[in-house]
Image: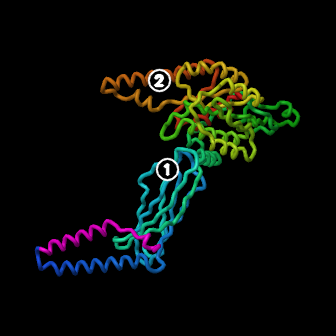
Amino acid sequence: MGKIKQLFLTNQFFYSLLGIATFFAISFFMKGLFTVAWIVFWLWLAVLIFDFIVLFSGKGRVEITRIYPEKLSNGDENPMKLMINSFYPFPTSIEILEEFPIQLQIRNNEYFTRLSAYQSTEISYLMRPTQRGIYEFGRCIALVKRFGFFKRRFLTNQAQQIPCYPSYIQLRKYQLLATSNRLNELGIKRIRRIGSAMEFDHVREYVQGDDYRHMNWKATAKIKKLMVNQYEEEKSQPIYSFIDLGRAMRMPFDGLTLLDYAINASLVLSNATILKQDRAGLLTFSKEVNVFIPAEKRNNQMLKISEALYQVTTNFEEPEYGKLYSYAKAHINKRSLIFLYTNFETLDSLRRQMNYLSMLNRSHIIVVIVFKNVEVEDLAKSAPKKTIEIYNQIIAEKFIYEKQLIVQELIRNGFQTIYTAPENLTINSINKYLEIKARGLI
């Protein structure tokens, strides 16, 4: 009885049955075809029986193994693999039905392959999740057929849950290129170091090309050799990512929200901070401060930040910058570099919060991220053909001009500013961090 539940009739079965019925109907008017119709029927029946026997008798089966990552990277193409093993002693055609998580809304979840006797193969595909959280894969179903009249179903896997974390693929990519000194491939700029944000390390002998301004004349006179002071970059500086969880951060771009872009960027920036021997911290806020991780550079700091960002969700509330200022003043005592991931859409919304941001900027260095509305910019550059399209283009240009006024207002009030498209946020944040370090502003 269990094997009968695995049996499925294919379209080929019904089409062939319809053809034989048609043959019998025609033989009713042409008596000479009646015997031929019966011969075709018995041959068809014999093929059906043989097809059923070879599919369901013996130890023939198909096994599918999911080779999925332990966690998914949000906003990235995650490699997924299905390993198919056939234990049939003859060639088979296999249809794979994967029950994808509901968040993905994937409809084309069928894969087809043909295997020889006792053969194995691998099906690879890419999956791009756009929401953090738990992704639950249902059962993986294999439908096997030999001659095409019947299919035998194998339930090869039960439900599997995979958590989706902020973009750790970007994180690993940055680490790999950083260790091989190839960050310019990602768009990371080489910043010319200026200013005096350097700490004395030791005195060494002069070599050609050293800056003569670093000559140590006392040591030179003492040992009668040219000596220079060796400096190193200041370390252990606190770098914070402040992430706004308010209504404006729900705006979507390319499947992700602005909050997701901010989370991915802050994760990579925190890792870059620790690689530069600085201390990384995190704060998320809306009406209240939700998460606060003090800036540290311990081994488990990135794990703490990643776990905190995994659970971050946005809401429809307006952020309270007054409470943010009070909390930061009470809990962040040392002068820090703060990246503020928020989204001011109008000049009035910025001016309402300007007093709090200015007070915070007196004690710290604030880098305010302003997001470009890429879709609005594309609309403004389009060629209108109808009157309504002209109106839409004018409104789009007004929004762009408003964004430019916001950036100018921030710069006029002494804020560091990043005006960027969401997809370029990570690279621009790292470049701004390296620029501020090189200029010795912190």
Residue 418 horizontal/vertical position (percent): 58, 29
Q: Label 2: how many residues lie within 10 Å, few (<14), some (14-19) or many (20+)?
A: some
Q: Is residue 54 above or below residue 121?
A: below
The residues bearing labels 1 and 2 have C-alpha atoms spaced at a distance of 35 Å
User: Which quarter of the figure has residue 393?
Assistant: top left
**Which residue is pictured at 66% across the width and 45% down the height?**
307
Q: Give the number of marks.
A: 2
What residue is shown with label 2? 399
Magenta span includes 4: yes
Q: Nearer the viewer, residue 420 or 106?
A: 106
Magenta span includes 118: no
Q: Amino acid at mark 1?
A: Ile
Judged by depth in the image, the label closer to the viewer, 1 or 2, is 1
Extent of the magenta region:
1-28
- Left or right: residue 191 versus residue 220 is left
What residue is shown with label 1? 102
Q: Label 1: how many residues lie within 10 Å, few (<14), some (14-19) or many (20+)?
A: few
Magenta span: predominant SS is helix
Q: What color scheme is it?
A: rainbow
Q: Is residue 285 above or below residue 26?
A: above
Quadrant location of the C terminus? top right
